[in-house]
Image (tube, rainbow, N blue to C red):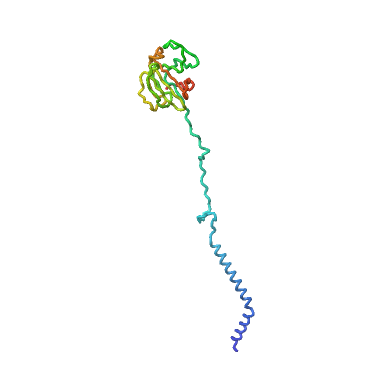
Amino acid sequence: MSKFTVAAKRFGGFMKRNAFYFLIILCIASVATVIALAVTHNSAVPDTDMNNVDGDNDSTVINPEPDDKKPDDEKPPVVQKLTFISPCNGTISAEYNDSKIVWNASMGAFETHCAIDFTSTDMNVYASADGTIKEVGYDKLDGNYIVIEHEEGYITKYMSLESESTLKVGAKVKQGQLIGKMAATKGTESADGAHLHFEMFKNGETINPLEVLVLDEK
């Protein structure tokens, strides 16, 4: 028997006696190889932001810039207060009297005077405030007249005008707009000469114009 044969038999016997141990070593080596491969793979994959649903690696969160004009910070719109100016560049010749009677030379009697009379050297008559022409006409007692309707329930009436106005009902007029000339009426105030008889109403009730008029020249 050759030396090679003897060696082969000895190796075979060794393998039979220690086969169990070789299997254990082989299993341990296999598990170690799998673990090593898994660790190597994980280290090669970059971290991703779990909150980034689009897969974008940029995890920076950009907050929108705050709106400088929040609803609570907005200022309420400025509401222009309705004001009335004097209907002429002149002086008051007869004041408003609704609680006591005054002498009316034209009628030869005592009566109330629910208006203000104005006289002026230029005779011009202006719209006291923005509004809409409500009525234009002639009355044998009050002469030619214009009625203007304003906001907030106000109405102004301009009487004893020189001629019938060319303004039409429904026309818009601006505060300070020239609407006519003063004249001497042949009616209830004919003795007072050329003047403007100016009446004012609030929600259908006559009021003293001096309660709201700003008597500045145009």
> Is 11 placed left or right of 176 in the picture?
right
Q: Nearer the viewer, residue 131 or 49?
A: 131
**Residue 63 x, y percent position in the rendering:** 52, 47
**Residue 80 x, y percent position in the rendering:** 47, 29
Q: Nearer the viewer, residue 111 or 195?
A: 111
Residue 118 image-quadrant placement: top left
* Total numbered labels placed on residues in the image: 0
Q: Quadrant of the N terminus?
A: bottom right
> Is 164 placed left or right of 216 in the picture?
left
- Whether residue 16 is visible here, answered yes or no, is yes
Q: Is residue 31 above or below residue 89?
A: below
Q: Which residue appears at 40% of the width and 19% of the height? A: 159
**Residue 37 x, y percent position in the rendering:** 56, 67
Residue 105 image-quadrant placement: top left
Q: Nearer the viewer, residue 127 or 144?
A: 144
**Residue 11 x, y percent position in the rendering:** 61, 82
Q: Which residue appears at 49% of the width and 21% of the height? A: 211
Q: Is residue 141 above or below residue 58?
A: above
Residue at the extreme right: 17
Residue at the extreme bottom: 1
- Whether residue 122 is visible here, answered yes or no, is no
